[in-house]
Amino acid sequence: LLGVTAREVAAALPLAEPRLQPARQDEATATACHACQATFTLFLRKHHCRGCGFVHCTSCLVTQPLPRFGHVAPVRACG
């Protein structure tokens, strides 16, 4: 770009919309998986999905990056 500074280019670009994390479901009130309805026990543990915020069991979550929320490293998310 001829005669244009990086600051001028950045100022001309549209601002990205904020990428807010979804509200997290209260773990204390979650008694069953949001996806498969399996009841949580001492051995079936609760995990929050970083994509939707609901509580799921391990079987219903996959590990994947969620760049829209700023997670470039893989995190637990429902498929």
Image (cartoon, grey):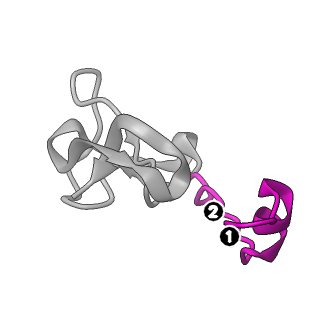
Residue 24 x/y as whole percent: 58, 52
Residue 47 x/y as whole percent: 38, 37
Looking at the picture, which amino acid does disc 2 mark? Arg
Looking at the picture, which amino acid does disc 1 mark? Ala
Would you say residue 16 sits in the magenta stretch? Answer: yes
Q: Residue furthest top?
A: 42
| Picture disc at residue 16 | 1
Q: Residue furthest front?
A: 2
* Residue numbers of the magenta segment: 1-24
Residue that carries the numbered disc 2 in the rendered image: 19
Local SS, label 2: loop
Classify mark 2: residues with Cα within 10 Å, few (<14), some (14-19) or many (20+): few
Q: Quadrant of the N terminus?
A: bottom right
Q: CA distance from mark 2 to mark 1?
A: 8 Å
Q: Residue at 84% across / 69% down in the picture? A: 11
State left or right for residue 31 relative to residue 60: right
